[in-house]
Amino acid sequence: MRRSGALLPVFALAACGQGTGSAPEPPMVTIECATDGASAFKRDCRVEPVVEGTRHLLIVHHPGGGFRRLLKVDDGRGVVAADGVVPAQVAWLVDGRLEVTVGGDRYRFPAKVKADGPKTP
């Protein structure tokens, strides 16, 4: 089996309230994360999908206000760091999730696995 870089389209639109003069909050999904070197994962990071031209980004918002930008790739890794000098390390977990580590931050994304395509001789 080949692991695909295509993350599940779990970014369902959430109901967003609009106050006077405020922009609507972008659609986001909550994922497990351990930020700033934390050892335990908590379900408190929010992910915003963004399209910039042909690039599909996932902006992970930390509960403390920080964020990371990850670029979705279709080469089996799932994502890479979209900017910065710290590379993203990715690992496919046995339960099908993608764990991404960038510096002292770790994230667990729901993901899907695609079967290998036809083999060429």
Image: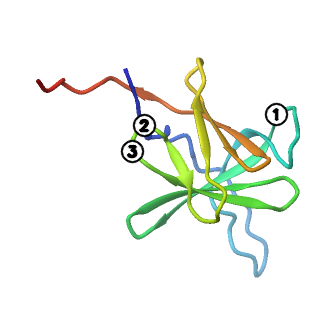
Residue at the extreme left: 121
Picture disc at residue 76: 2
To which residue does mark 1 refer?
A: 41
Label 3 Cα crowd, 10 Å radius (few <14 / some 14-19 / many 20+): few
First along the sequence among labels 3 and 1: 1
Label 2 Cα crowd, 10 Å radius (few <14 / some 14-19 / many 20+): some
Quadrant of the image occupied by residue 117: top left
Q: Is residue 23 above or below residue 74?
A: below
* Residue nearer the viewer, 47 or 34: 34
Q: The disc labelled 3 sits on which kind of residue?
A: Asp
Picture disc at residue 64: none
Mark 1 falls on what kind of element?
Answer: loop
**The C terminus lies in which quarter of the figure?**
top left
To which residue does mark 3 refer?
A: 74
Q: The disc labelled 1 sits on which kind of residue?
A: Phe
First along the sequence among labels 1 and 2: 1
Q: CA distance from mark 3 to mark 1?
A: 26 Å
Mark 2 falls on what kind of element?
Answer: loop
- Indicate left or right for 6 with 68 as reference: left
Q: Is residue 25 above or below residue 15?
A: below
Q: CA distance from mark 1 to mark 2?
A: 24 Å
Quadrant of the image occupied by residue 86: bottom right
Image colouring: rainbow
* Residue nearer the viewer, 49 or 113: 113
